[in-house]
Image (spheres, grey):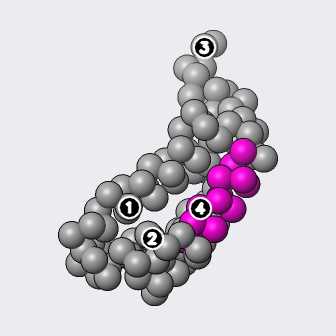
Amino acid sequence: MFPKVEMFAQPDKAESLTVAVKQWIHNWMDGSNCGFEDQYEFSKDMLLHVLKHNQDFLTILGVDQCQQIWHWINTKFLPLKIFTAFYPKGLLRCFEDFMNNVVRA
């Protein structure tokens, strides 16, 4: 489960950072910034780097909470990335178009 605001080291400042992380992940899903696998991988690596090394994140959220966020991403999002991330959906597009169209006799 994504950590609740009350769990962070400085809860009064944490909301803006958690919103930023959620928007970052949402960009993986909508394809506006991560339409290709290399963009997705770069963005994912950058988020991991931020959660491990950015002093603002570590101070405001707390080291344990940053690790918990990354654990949440690894266990909830990444195993399902073929369905949630934008770039692999191109592989599923033909199937979705075929299955979502009305069959005409």
Helix, strand or loop at mark 4:
helix
What is the CA distance from the residue labelled 2 to the residue labelled 1?
7 Å
Which is more toward the observer, 80 or 4?
A: 4
Helix, strand or loop at mark 2:
helix
Q: Which residue is mark 2?
A: 57
Check the image and report above or below for 101 versus 88: above
Observer-side mark, 4 or 3, equals 4
What is the CA distance from the residue labelled 1 to the residue labelled 4?
12 Å
| Label 4: few (<14), some (14–19) or many (≥20) C-alpha neighbours in 10 Å | some
Percent of width and height locating residue 31: 60, 36
Percent of width and height locating residue 94: 72, 30
Q: Are marks 2 and 1 in contact (CB under 8 Å)?
A: yes
Check the image and name the residue furthest to the bottom.
Answer: 64
What is the CA distance from the residue labelled 4 to the residue labelled 3?
46 Å
- In the rendered structure, which amino acid carries the disc numbered 4? Leu
Observer-side mark, 1 or 3, equals 1
Dot placed on the residue nearer the N-terminal end, 1 or 4:
1
Q: Is residue 34 left or right of residue 36?
A: left
User: At x 69% / y 62%, what residue is drawn?
Assistant: 45
Q: Which residue is mark 3?
A: 104
User: At x 63% / y 68%, what residue is drawn?
Assistant: 49
Q: Is residue 30 left or right of residue 105?
A: left
What is the CA distance from the residue labelled 1 to the residue labelled 3?
50 Å
- In the rendered structure, which amino acid carries the disc numbered 3? Arg
User: At x 63% / y 13%, what residue is drawn?
Assistant: 105
User: At x 32% / y 57%, what residue is drawn?
Assistant: 16
Q: Which residue is mark 1?
A: 17
What is the CA distance from the residue labelled 2 to the residue labelled 3?
55 Å
